[in-house]
Amino acid sequence: MVLPRALPRPTALTGPARWVWETNYIRKLVVLDLLVGVVGALAALQFRVGPGTEFSNQVIMVLVFPMVWVLSIALGRAYESRFLFAGNDEYRAVFRGAIGLIAVVAMGAYIINTQFARRYVIIAVPVVLILTIVARYLMRQRLHMSWGRGQRLRRVILIGHGAAVVQLTRQLRRERFHGLGVVGACLPANSPMHREKARDGAPPIYGTFDDVAAAVRYARADTVLVLSCPELDGPTLRRMAWQLENDKIDLIVASTLVDVAGDRTTIRPVDGLPLLHVEHPKLRGMRRVIKDMFDRVGALLGLILISPLLLTIAALVKFGPGGGPAFFRQVRVGRDGQQFNIFKFRTMHTDAEARLAEIMNLNEHDGALFKMRNDPRITPVGRWLRRFSLDELPQLFNVLLGHMSLVGPRPPLPAEVAKYPADMRRRLVVKPGMTGLWQVSGRSDLSWEESIRLDLRYVENWSLTMDLVILARTITAVARVSGAY
């Protein structure tokens, strides 16, 4: 298939080709894992797991164990590119490799009746497991930083209808942590976008569904992403995959499901037909009890540790410019629509509510919230508190009282909830949180629609691991101070 001559120039993305940087990335992972294996081997010897062991045997263990460690996690599929770069599958693969190594050594030690290998591995494996996960996390963060600069992105051709292509293109350009860079699209033959002037945010159009293989070669793409489209049935996708096979182009088929985590989906083939089974989110029972315990214990420990800071901030607010009470209380809506008083350090002058009508026309937010970067009602101390989100620390009392969680959707005002359509009320089935996906994804810089979407994603895919990740990312988000006003 030959493309028409009058085509837009391919989008320029910086950095080497995908297979080049992916290969280098995996090689660095192997070297890193070997070094971590050496550290774990030395740590095991340091703790005198074998006091009678000869020096030659110690040297052998230091040389052999790193290679055994790399082999074990390789068998756990920790070097497959489809598990790397994003998501938790990479860490699960490392964990599987560690468990497998412990099992093999335990069986071998039992067969040959030796205690040395058993004691050695009991210390060495936990050490290398923790260090490997930390090292791979740091490697991934470095890669994500380069993605944020538009480097090392996959060159993606989108296949689907015009509106869906434009929407996904805008989203992928706004969020670079996924590593996908859209360089073009192929649309149905009857799409009006073939004849229209290029839309704002739309990628270059390289033809119809029959031109995919030629478009990939023209745009030097390495990935084809197929959106939900009735024209692309099973046989058509199969033929497309055959065309892309020789050039080793990745084919990704997007599901029509929105914001559903991989843990809730399972592919079950039935008579050659891959059926996607979707589990319901587990929002009740023991999982909720565990989350409540985690929240309250974490809030209590947090209050004990930062009590001097809380007292200092309270004094600054009370005796600072403008005076007035140190704390601000406001009615918010919690789980199942129950209202409660949220606690915050006061960041505005005491007459802030009365002055709101005067500046309502200066609202910089597109939803029911009022947000303004240079709100004149904010005190000098309050502006500093908001910059680092310190004004929200008293919400630990709300968590301790059971009104809120450490992590959850943003706590809405009753006026916001009154305007919710039916879908948005879904976010009220869990407690609101001090932080959440909205906090670590842009804070006040997010649009109303995007913040709601992130809240719903959290509700549908909650897990304790997710909470821990969000808490860790919150520290970075607060340090960046972007979107805080």
Image: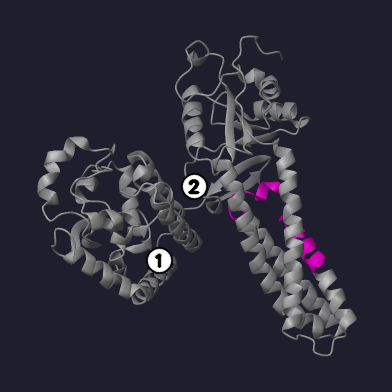
Residue beneath the point at 47% across and 31% down: 170
Q: Residue 383: give x, y in percent of width and height.
A: 27, 53
Residue beneath the point at 69% across and 26% down: 220
Evaluate whether residue 411 shows in this view. no
Residue beneath the point at 68% across and 32% down: 222
- Chain-order first, disc 2 or disc 1: 2
Evaluate whether residue 146 shows in this view. yes
Q: Give the range drawn in magenta.
A: 66-89
Colour theme: one colour
Q: Residue 346: give x, y in percent of width and height.
A: 21, 60
Q: Name the residue under label 1.
A: 288
Seen in the picture, residue 259 relative to 196 is either above or below; the reply is: below
Quadrant of the rendered image containing residue 74: bottom right
- Disc 2 to disc 1: CB gap under 8 Å: no
Q: Is residue 338 left or right of residue 389?
A: left
Seen in the picture, residue 440 relative to 14 is either above or below; the reply is: below
Three-letter amino acid code at the position of disc 2: Val
Furthest-bottom residue in this view:
52
Can you tell which mark lies on residue 260? 2
Quadrant placement of the N terminus: top right
- Residue 70 painted magenta: yes
The one of 451 and 11 positioned closer to us in this rendering: 11
The one of 67 and 322 positioned closer to us in this rendering: 322
Q: Residue 20: give x, y in percent of width and height.
A: 74, 40
- Label 1: element kind: helix
How far is disc 2 from disc 1 in space, using C-alphas?
A: 19 Å
- Label 2: element kind: loop
How many C-alpha atoms fall within 10 Å of the one at disc 2: few (<14), some, or many (≥20)?
A: some
The one of 230 and 6 positioned closer to us in this rendering: 6
